[in-house]
Amino acid sequence: MAKEIPLPTCAVCPVTVPERICRQEKGKAPGNCPSTRSLDILKETLEILKDPDVMEVVRQASIQEGEGYGDKDKGYANIRPIKPRIQETIEFAQKMKFKRICLIFCIGMRKEAEIIHKIFSDNGFETISVMCKAGAVSKEEIGLLREQQIDTENFEAMCNPILQALTANAHESEMNVLFGLCVGHDALFLKYAKAYNTVLASKDRLLAHNPLAAIYQYDSYYRYLKNPL
């Protein structure tokens, strides 16, 4: 049996950032570093990159990343972000020469979705948009009791990310933009969608769709996260 590759834990890497091998050619690495221990995976990655279509996505994404910063001429310590994600999404799609975009959104964010749809259309994209409740399938069809619904007294349609994905596939979307899907529903959409996917915003009902607020306040108001939920 082949020797098992140790699980990578980049998020808690003990090497300081400037010294890491992923930051400089002769950098340091812990024993479970995927840059040094997952050589078969790295080789497979390079083989995939030989596909010209894949290479173009990688290349344009990296160009877009670089264009997201200003003052580069002043040195790395002085760079600053200059573009919001909606702008970068549009620019990347233009770089890729995509013509048709599908906006996959939650009914709770329909007002914002209307604006985003307009922005995409105004920038010349043939824009599809599919809301989470499309299909109008009752939550009772998937075995939920009324008391498990949000509205416990009336018909309530289930979120249907698989339908959203298959609809995007059927209309040959070239890039899907996820906007505010629930945890789990986004996972299902990503599993069944065929086109390239990007996320414009993640749902966080409590924090106005800013999930990082809880992380930023890990030592204060959200210190309960230090204990198992």
Image (cartoon, rainbow, N blue to C red):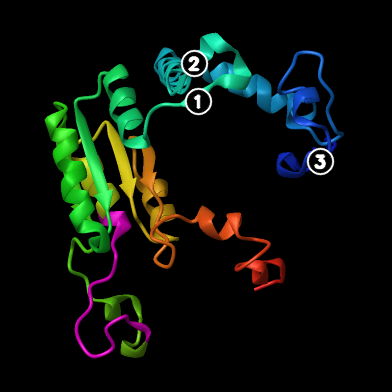
Q: In this view, does 20 lie to the left or right of 78?
A: right
Residue at which label 2 appears: 71
Q: Which amino acid does label 1 sit on?
A: Arg
* Residue ID for mark 1: 80
Residue 146 within the segment the image draws in magenta: no
**Magenta stretch: residue 149 in it?**
yes
Q: Overall secondary structure of the magenta stretch?
A: loop
Q: Is residue 35 above or below residue 154?
A: above
Q: Pointer 3: what residue?
A: 6
Residue at the (23%, 40%) spot, across then down: 102
CB of mark 2 within 8 Å of CB of mark 1?
A: yes
N-term mark: 1 or 3: 3
Determine the image quadrant of residue 110: bottom left
Label annotation for residue 50 = none
**Real-space Cα distance between discs 1 and 3?**
36 Å
Between 216 and 107, the one lying in front of the other is: 216
Q: Give the range drawn in magenta.
A: 148-163
The spot of residue 150 in percent (x, y) is: 31, 80
Q: Quadrant of the N terminus?
A: top right
Furthest-top residue in this view: 73
